[in-house]
Image: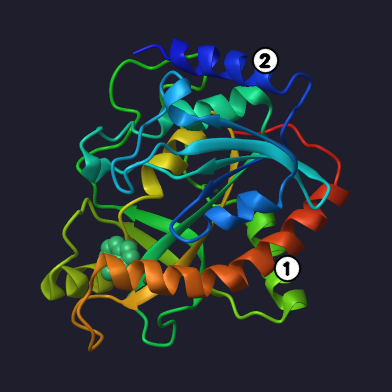
Amino acid sequence: MTDDCAFEAAALVRQRKPGFVPRLGLILGSGLGPLAEQLSDAVSVRFDELPGFPVSTVHGHAGELVLGTLAGLPVACLKGRAHFYEGYGLGVMTGAVRTLKLLGCEMLLVTNAAGSLRREADAGSLVAVTDHINLLPGTPMVGPNDERFGPRFFSLANAYDRELLALLKASAQTSGIGLHEGVYAAFPGPNFETAAEIRMMSILGADLVGMSLVPEVIAARHCGLKVVAVSVVTNLAEGLGTTDLSHEQTLKYAALGAKDLVSVLLAFVTELARRPATPAST
Ligand code: HPA
């Protein structure tokens, strides 16, 4: 499938904020929307105005793309994402990610809520993602390849960019905030996992489990965006904790961890703003 939608969406966004070239794209997960309020000279475009963007069914309102400057860095925030379990298919975020690339982004920072398979990283903890295990029924790149964005076959060897990860860790340290590292397993949802599935994931080497991230990262790597990802732990995964899993619990702890995450991200973005722009690589 060719993705003309992304070109149309990028053209529309450029009309709304002429001359603006974001360097970093951000996907803001549950509880992190308020980060977008810290952008200066912000301009918002609703997802339902943008071809190829998903209209999320989770919170009953459209997400928005917010463009502006954060700690000196021009950024584009996707506020509100859609998920595979909403019924859109695995390419649900591909158009939005490609639009960020066409607007000029070199990097993509992805945040999300996740369950933890490590007792030492319990609710409220932050975990930098070092790699992933895809347990979804496919990848977003199945089907004809649109060569304008990237090659048919591509590597995920440095999917979570080592340099950006090092910078994220340094930013957490200077902010005095603990940051674990771990492997994220993507589960389709919308039901949480069974305890047996969590035991399986543990054997496979997962430290985190969640229902997003992986399709977005694959789409981003296909088009050469450098990726950094951080999860806010909202619960110990099924079978490891004592509380029942629920969306309410996810939102409560996402908001709790979000405060720390905002501090780390501001330090991270401040440092990125000092660095010269680098061309995206595959
Ligand atoms: N499993 C899957 N997704 C999640 C979880 C979980 O335990 N917590 C937050 N998102």
Q: Is residue 10 above or below residue 125?
A: above
Left or right position of 84 against 127? left
Q: Is residue 66 above or below residue 238?
A: above
The amino acid type found where label 1 is placed reads Ser
Image mark count: 2
> For mark 2, what is the residue?
15
Name which of mark 1 and mark 2 comes first in the sequence.
2
Q: Quadrant of residue 16?
A: top right
Q: Which residue extends farthest front?
A: 61
Badge 2: residue crowd in 10 Å (few <14, some 14–19, many ≥20): few
Identify which residue is drawn at 24% across, 38% down: 138
- Residue 171 image label: 1
Identify which residue is drawn at 45% across, 45% down: 80
Identify which residue is drawn at 73% across, 70% down: 170
The amino acid type found where label 2 is placed reads Gln
Q: Can you see residue 84?
A: yes
CA distance separating discs 1 and 2: 34 Å
Dot 2: element: helix
Q: Can you see residue 206?
A: no
Q: Give whichever of 234, 208 is nearer the camera.
A: 234
- Residue 99 image label: none
Give percent across and percent down for residue 218.
43, 39
Badge 1: residue crowd in 10 Å (few <14, some 14–19, many ≥20): many
Question: Where ligand 1 lies, by quadrant?
Answer: bottom left
